[in-house]
């Protein structure tokens, strides 16, 4: 059984959903308060959605300086799987652990709706259990989710298969329909949609399970980058 | 010495500015014509204890690049302001 640390910042609000997703798939979730400086015994880290530190300045701008982020960076540097969902994705780009940035949505509206995602790379801990071209219905819930990066970064992302998920119908103006990206090693992934909220057909979709199962499966079969 | 510093944070050239363009589109409806190139940004102001203006600006620039702006999409410019 994998032990997954779910980081809780002041203002996080999806930590229970993330933990429920983890336990539903048979693994153990443990809340990690943002002042903690070690991740001893943790097999994977999830940075959940919400409004860490009130999203003041920019989403993720203050959270990246929380004490726990040093531990998360060290954990990722040793190949540990790290997943940032929504606000967690914003924290990872602000921390420089993932390339690019997330801007206000194109239409300047908060978006809360189901989206159809298309898997575009399986070279990541989040998508390795999926198939390329697979469509997944997963909800979004954000104001600053428009992914942006310069041309050079974009070329690199495409070349390395770091764009892991794209929107089928771009809701927020993201460059190249990007919904989720991975780092070059594939062990750090961020996405704006919420797979932890797509865990039951009764609640609209269970397609998020494919993604969380991939992420949790890392403990069972260590992730080795394919490309 | 205490220096009053103003830092302007603006989106880098080529980065979409939906806030600026929405404001620009709203202006004609209010009767303001001939206003173009509207850009939205942030302004920060604070006091910096330093030996000289240069030292104050250097400190302000450094903290602006580290925290106040996201260098991936934003530029930060520090200047000595007037109260």
Image (cartoon, coloured by chain):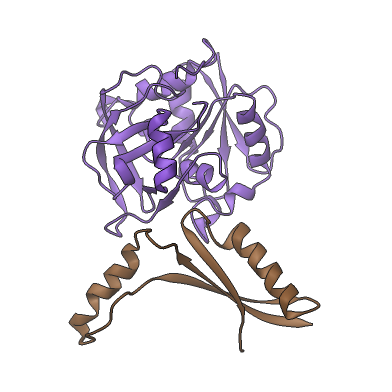
Residue A28, compared with residue A195, is above or below; it is above
> Which chain shows up in brown?
B
Name the quadrant of the C terminus of chain B.
bottom right
Can you say whether A126 is above or below B58 in the image? above
Chain A: colour as depicted: purple
**A104 up-or-down from A42: above or below:** below
Q: Where does residue A211 sit, x and y in percent of width and height?
A: 38, 24
| Lateral position of residue A46 relative to residue B36, left or right | right
How many numbered marks does the figure carry?
A: 0
Describe residue A192's horizontal placement relative to residue A29 as left or right. left
**A179 or B10, nearer to the observer:** B10
Q: Which of A161 and B3 is in front in this view?
A: A161
Q: In this view, does B15 lie above or below A70?
A: below
Considering every residue shown, the one lying at the far top of the view is: A221
**Residue at 44% of width from left, 62% of height from top?**
B12
Side of A68 relative to B69 (left or right): right
Please state the horizontal and vertical placement of residue A51, each as a whole percent of the image: 48, 51
Can you give x and y, in whole percent of width and height, for residue B42 in the image? Answer: 48, 70
Left or right placement of residue B58 versus residue A105 in this view = right
Name which residue lies at 51% across and 39% down: A98
Q: Which residue is drawn at 57% across and 41% down?
A: A8
Tell me what residue is drawn at x 52 percent, y 10 percent: A220
Q: Is residue A221 or residue B59 the one in the foreground?
A: B59
The N terminus of chain B: image quadrant: bottom right
x, y (%) of residue A53?
56, 54
């Amino acid at each position: 059984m994998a032990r997954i640390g779910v980081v809780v910042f002041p203002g996080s609000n999806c930590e229970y959903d993330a933990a429920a997703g983890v336990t539903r798939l048979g693994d153990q979730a443990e809340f990690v308060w943002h002042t903690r400086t070690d991740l001893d015994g943790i097999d994977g880290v999830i940075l959940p959605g919400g409004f860490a530190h009130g999203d003041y300045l920019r989403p993720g701008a203050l959270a990246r300086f929380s004490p726990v982020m040093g531990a998360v960076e060290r954990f990722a540097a040793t190949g540990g799987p790290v997943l940032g969902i929504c606000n967690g994705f914003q924290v990872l780009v602000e921390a420089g652990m993932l390339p690019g940035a997330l801007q206000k949505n194109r239409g300047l509206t908060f978006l809360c709706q189901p989206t159809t995602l298309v898997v575009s790379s399986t070279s990541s801990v989040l998508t390795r259990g999926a198939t390329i071209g697979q469509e997944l219905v997963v909800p979004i819930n954000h104001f600053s989710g428009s992914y942006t990066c310069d041309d050079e970064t974009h070329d690199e992302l495409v070349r390395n298969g770091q764009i892991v998920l794209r929107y089928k119908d771009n809701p927020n103006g993201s460059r190249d329909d990007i919904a989720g990206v991975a780092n070059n090693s594939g062990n750090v992934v961020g996405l704006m949609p919420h797979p932890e909220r797509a865990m039951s057909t009764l609640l609209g979709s269970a397609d998020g399970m494919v993604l969380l199962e991939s992420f949790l499966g890392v403990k069972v079969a260590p992730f080795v980058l394919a490309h | 010495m205490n220096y009053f510093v103003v830092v302007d944070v603006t989106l880098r050239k080529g980065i979409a500015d939906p806030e600026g363009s929405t404001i620009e589109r709203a202006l004609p409806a209010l009767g303001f014509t001939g206003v173009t190139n509207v850009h939205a940004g942030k302004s920060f102001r604070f006091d910096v204890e330093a030996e000289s203006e240069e030292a104050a600006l250097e400190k302000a620039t450094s903290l602006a690049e580290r925290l106040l702006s996201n260098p991936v999409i934003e530029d930060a410019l520090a200047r000595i302001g007037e109260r």
